[in-house]
Amino acid sequence: MNKGRAIYPGSFDPPTNGHLDLIQRGAKIFEELVVAILRNSEKTPMFGTSERLEMLKELTADLPNVRIATFDGLMVEYAKSIDAMCVLRGIRAISDYEYELQMALMNRKIEPTLETVFMMPADKYSYVSSRLVREVAQAGGPVKGLVPEVVEQKLLQKLDPAYKLAEVNLIEVPKKRKKKA
Ligand code: PNS
């Protein structure tokens, strides 16, 4: 088992500034951090696996000890297959704790050698979640500061009807005209 290798599993649909904050913190304490995107969750994701993979690769390009991967099935099985010793998970508030504790203990029951390590993202991200980001963005609200800029652009593209039309008809997206003063 590689003591320096940790896995940070999640849906990352989409990656938020909270996720990125945790990845940066994790990269400082583990020799290698594998950010592992769950491929087939029960939920229908907003972003496909390859989109999430690309976004996370771009966001972590400056972190040489961070690797992005995808997995299916049991997380502990995947962690074992890549020889990871730790699971990194973020806890934003007490409300996260119950679910995270339950998951950590279940994972320990299945694979007792795998340890879960909890870290806290910066408090300014304590209310940020992928679900709320999706909800706000889908309703046309602002997500600036909640997600990295590349993710914000992807959200806009996904939700902008002009882009959707362009995807279907392979037409060029018209540039928005600046309003005259
Ligand atoms: O970011 P999320 O959606 O809270 O991440 C949850 C995730 C992907 C870590 C969890 O659902 C998971 O590990 N799923 C893989 C299947 C599994 O191992 N389930 C047992 C969990 S105790």
Image: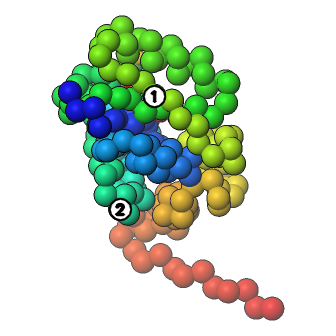
Residue at the bottom extreme, as displayed: 181
Question: Is residue 82 among what the camera can see?
Answer: yes
Q: Nearer the viewer, residue 147 or 88?
A: 88
| Residue 174, position as x, y percentages in the image | 51, 80
The answer to which image quadrant residue 94 occupies is: top right
Give, as a three-letter code, the residue at label 1. Val
Mark 2 nearby-residue class (10 Å; few <14, some 14–19, many ≥20) = few
Does residue 11 appear to the left or right of 138 in the view shown? left
Residue picked out by circle 2: 61
| Residue 161, position as x, y percentages in the image | 54, 62
Q: Nearer the viewer, residue 81 or 32?
A: 32
The residue under the point 57% across, 46% down is: 18
The answer to which image quadrant residue 95 occupies is: top right
| Residue 156, position as x, y percentages in the image | 55, 62
Mark 1 nearby-residue class (10 Å; few <14, some 14–19, many ≥20) = some
The residue under the point 58% across, 37% down is: 120
